[in-house]
Structures are given as C-alpha cells and as structure tokens.
Amino acid sequence: MADNIKADICIIGAGSGGLSVAAGASQLGASVVLIEKDKMGGDCLNYGCVPSK
C-alpha cells in the first residue's frame, strides 16, 4: 500500500492547463501533486495540434 501524501492541491492531467495551474500554485507557496497517466505536456506538445478555428 502506498504512503499518504499531503498536498494543498492535486491536479489531474499534465497538459498545458494542468502544468500552468501547477506552476502557478507552486509559486504561490502551495504544495502541489500533479498526476498524469501519459506523457507530460499533453497532445499538442507531444504529437502536434491542428487548430480548427
């Protein structure tokens, strides 16, 4: 069984939004846990985006 982790904020998803929120919260002094099941950065960073608008 895993140990307990205490954090002020838990962010699920390390795409562009999750990384931005994690960085901002950390700069404000929050203890942050970031959970990602795949590569950090999301689809656009790792595979490329095709803007539709």
Image (tube, rainbow, N blue to C red):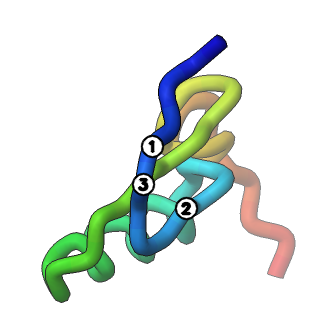
Q: Is residue 52 above or below residue 53?
A: above
- For the view shown, which residue lies furthest in the right direction? 52
Q: Secondary structure at mark 2?
A: strand
How far apart in space, not on screen, are marks 1 and 2 (Cα)?
A: 10 Å
Residue drawn at the location 49% of the way across and 43% of the way down: 41
Marks 2 and 1: in contact by CB < 8 Å? no
Q: Is residue 17 left or right of residue 50?
A: left
Q: Quadrant of the N terminus?
A: top right
Q: Is residue 11 left or right of residue 52?
A: left
* Residue nearest the observer in this picture, 1 or 33: 1
Marks 1 and 3: in contact by CB < 8 Å? yes
* Residue nearest the observer in this picture, 4 or 41: 4
Residue 2 position by quadrant: top right
Residue 11 in the image: state x and y as whole percent: 57, 61
Q: Amino acid at mark 2?
A: Cys
* Residue nearest the observer in this picture, 1 or 14: 1
Q: Secondary structure at mark 3?
A: loop
- Which residue matches tag 2? 10
Mark 1 or 2, which is nearer the eye? 1
Q: Is residue 24 above or below residue 5?
A: below
Residue 17 in the image: state x and y as whole percent: 55, 70
Residue 43 in the image: state x and y as whole percent: 67, 41
Q: Residues within 10 Å of mark 2 (few under 14, many from 20)?
A: some
Residue 20 position by quadrant: bottom left
Q: Secondary structure at mark 1?
A: loop
Residue drawn at the location 48% of the way across and 71% of the way down: 9
How far apart in space, not on screen, are marks 3 and 1 (Cα)?
A: 4 Å
Residue drawn at the location 28% of the way across and 80% of the way down: 24
Label disc, if present, on residue 5 of the rendered structure: 1
